[in-house]
Amino acid sequence: MNIPEGILCTKTHEWVLEEGEKATIGLTDYAVEQLGDVVFVELPEIGNTFSKDEVFATIESVKAASEIYMPVGGKIVAVNEELINSPELINEDAFQNWLVQIELDNFKDDSEGLMEYSDYKEEVQ
């Protein structure tokens, strides 16, 4: 699994990779491992706006259904359509198979409290 450099993680197991005015958001490898085989992903529509910590998506596995929280605020500018038709892709690589891309509201403030991946991994071990 190829972990992108510079990703930040939440205590609720989402990751965010800031890229200037935009950011890519997904679920961490740990979250995907805990969920087991993913069978359904519900993603928001392009143009929807979410605040930090707001539920923006749902994921279902053979074990459970889980809500996914927005790690930073912003407007949805892209959704990973591939996951809607093939949700199991997220099991293959949680970082390659992102959920949404957003136009950032205030990354500097919203990113406070997020952890670098190495710190996140220590916390979930």
Image (cartoon, rainbow, N blue to C red):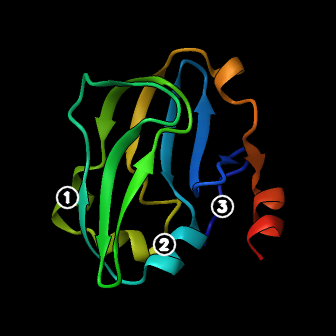
**Relative to 17, is 93 on the left or the right?**
left
Residue beneath disc 2: 32
Q: Quadrant of the C terminus?
A: bottom right
- What residue is shown at x 54% (from left), y 18% (from top)? 21
Instruction: Tell me where residue 40 appears, x and y as whole percent.
Output: 22, 68
> How busy is the neighbourhood of tag 2: few (under 14 within 10 Å), some, or many (20 plus)?
some
| Side of 69 where 117 appears, left or right | right
Q: Residues within 10 Å of mark 1 (few under 14, many from 20)?
A: some
* Identity of the residue drawn at 48% across and 70% down: 93
User: Which residue corresponds to the image point at 39% horizontal and 42% vertical from the top-left?
Assistant: 55
Marked residue nearer the N-terminal end (1 or 2): 2
| Earlier sequence position, callout 1 versus callout 3 | 3
70 sits left or right of 124 in the view: left
- Mark 3 or mark 2, earlier in chain: 3
Secondary element type, mark 3: loop
Q: Residue at x 51, y 36 (%)?
A: 53
Relative to 89, 23 lies left or right:
right
Residue under pointer 1:
84
Where the N terminus falls, by quadrant?
bottom right
Q: CA distance from mark 1 to mark 2?
A: 16 Å
> Considering only vertical position in the picture, is 43 above or below 50?
below
| Mark identifier at residue 26 | none
Q: Amino acid at mark 3?
A: Ile
Q: CA distance from mark 1 to mark 3?
A: 22 Å
Give the farthest residue toward the left. Answer: 85
Of labels 3 and 2, the one closer to you: 2
Badge 1 vs badge 3, beta-carbon distance below 8 Å = no
Three-letter amino acid code at disc 1?
Answer: Ile
The residue labelled by disc 3 is 3
Q: Around disc 3, counting alpha carbons within 10 Å, would you say few (fewer than 14), some (14 to 19), or many (20 or more)? A: few
- Find residue 121 and report its image quarter: bottom right
